[in-house]
Image (spheres, rainbow, N blue to C red):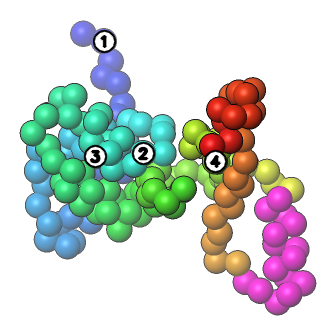
Amino acid sequence: MGPRKEDPAREEKELLAAYLSRHRLKRSEPRELIVDTFLRSEQHLSVDDLLALVRRRRPDIGRTTVYRTLKLLSAAGLAQELEIRGQTRFEREHNREHHDHFICRVCGRILEFSNPEIERLQEENAAALGFLIEGHRHQIFGLCRSCQSRPASESRR
């Protein structure tokens, strides 16, 4: 047998276990499956997106369980909620580099980007105004490459 592969989400799972213990919340097999599925994803998932993924293995898991687990992950600092086009999506948060989002207003595609120059300019502007930045979410809305190439009548509904 070869060397055991390290679980890349091990630290996040340990942090969640500590959070559950501190708040006297129980672990459950459905919750564990939802957490594992979420932590394996690199997507910005809605409750329904994650529900569809989880139901591939456990069709009996309900939407409410997925929703509560995502809220729990957010409270534990392991997921971040993003409000995009009137829908809440969740992305992994723990130990991730800061990034911002381009969001297609037609198809909803989300592209992540980082730009040190933008961050520097924000800090400079805040300092000039005597403002202390504690955090921010930068979301830029427009059209992705795919939607730009569609006929106008099709992509700009």
- Mark 1 closeness class: few <14, some 14–19, many ≥20 residues within 10 Å: few
| Mark 1 or 4, closer to the camera | 4
| Mark 2 or 1, closer to the camera | 2
Would you identify the image quadrant in which residue 8 lies?
A: top left
Answer with mark 1 or mark 4, whichever residue precedes in sequence. Answer: 1
Spatial distance from mark 2 to mark 1, Cα to Cα?
A: 34 Å
Answer with mark 4 or mark 2, whichever residue precedes in sequence. Answer: 2
Under circle 3, the secondary element is helix
Q: Is residue 78 above or below residue 55?
A: below
Report x, y in % for residue 138: 68, 61
- Mark 2 closeness class: few <14, some 14–19, many ≥20 residues within 10 Å: some
Q: Amino acid at mark 1?
A: Gly
Query: Residue 105 has which mark?
Result: 4
Q: Amino acid at mark 4?
A: Arg
Answer with mark 3 or mark 4, whichever residue precedes in sequence. Answer: 3
Contact between marks 1 and 3 (CB within 8 A): the answer is: no
Spatial distance from mark 4 to mark 2, Cα to Cα?
A: 16 Å
Q: Is residue 135 above or below residue 153?
A: below
**Residue at the bottom extreme of this rendering:** 130
Answer with mark 2 or mark 1, whichever residue precedes in sequence. Answer: 1
The residue carrying mark 1 is: 2
